[in-house]
Structures are given as structure tokens and as C-alpha cells.
Image (cartoon, rainbow, N blue to C red):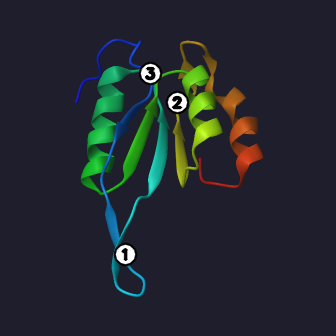
Amino acid sequence: MILPEPEHRLKRQTARLRLFSDGWKNVAVRILLVEDDAALAGAVCSYLVAKAFVVDLAPSLADARAALATAQYAAVLLDLHLGDGDGLGLLPTIRAQRERPI
């Protein structure tokens, strides 16, 4: 999957993970991918969706901050060298929400 223009900010790929808990239920495991390289982001998103994760793609720090403000994520995959700053600058925002793998 190759993502189009940068103006298409937050992209979501959806899949469901079926877990057993008092029967089979659909449980979405959400991951935030912060990556500005469209080809790499597309490859990672495709892989994760195939493994039954819900993936939100934020191609910039601003988009990542907006996504973190509106949703909870099980994990964040963070690019360190983004067009609008250093990915490490997002760590305090991520940690302020709750402890999660980065």
C-alpha cells in the first residue's frame, strides 16, 4: 500500500483480532505508526493489518499528537527522523497518557 499525498493525514487500516474470553469476541488491538516515508509506512501497515492489528498512521509529529489526544493505543511505532521534528520529542506526550511499548 502506497499512501498518497501528505495531506491525507491520519490513515486507518482495520482488522480484528479474535480472542477467547467468555466466548469468541472481536477485539481491536490498536497501534499508532508514526512514519513519514510513504513506502515504508505502507509496508508496515500492510504487515500489521495482515496480522490482525488496527493501525493508525500519522505521517508527522503534529498528526501523532492529534491521534494520541483522541485514541488509546496498545503500542506506538515511532520514527525518529520526521519532517517536522525529532520523534523523541513525542515521548513525553506518549508517556503522559500511560505506560506503553514504544
In the rendered view of the protein, which quadrant contains the N terminus? top left
Q: Residues within 10 Å of mark 2 (few under 14, many from 20)?
A: some
Disc 3/disc 2 C-alpha distance (Å): 16 Å
Tell me which label, 2 or 1, sits earlier in the chain: 1
Q: Does residue 32 sit above or below 79 in this rendering?
A: below
Dot 2 lies on which element? loop
Whole-percent x, y for residue 99 in the image: 70, 55
Q: Front-most of 61 and 9?
A: 9
The quarter holding residue 83 reads top right
Contact flag, marks 2 and 1 (Cβ < 8 Å): no
Residue 79 image label: 2
Dot 3 lies on which element? loop
Disc 1/disc 3 C-alpha distance (Å): 31 Å
Q: Front-most of 97 and 84?
A: 97
- Residue drawn at (53%, 21%), measured in percent from left and top? 60
The quarter holding residue 86 reads top right
Contact flag, marks 3 and 2 (Cβ < 8 Å): no
Of circles 2 and 1, the one toward us is 1
What residue is pinned by disc 1?
A: 19
What residue is pinned by disc 3?
A: 9
Whole-percent x, y for residue 51 in the image: 29, 56
Q: Residues within 10 Å of mark 1 (few under 14, many from 20)?
A: few
Q: Residues within 10 Å of mark 3 (few under 14, many from 20)?
A: some
Q: Does residue 44 sit above or below 83 in this rendering?
A: below
Q: Does residue 1 sit above or below 30 in this rendering?
A: above
Residue type of the residue flagged with mark 2: Asp
Residue type of the residue flagged with mark 3: Arg
- Residue drawn at (44%, 58%), measured in percent from left and top? 29
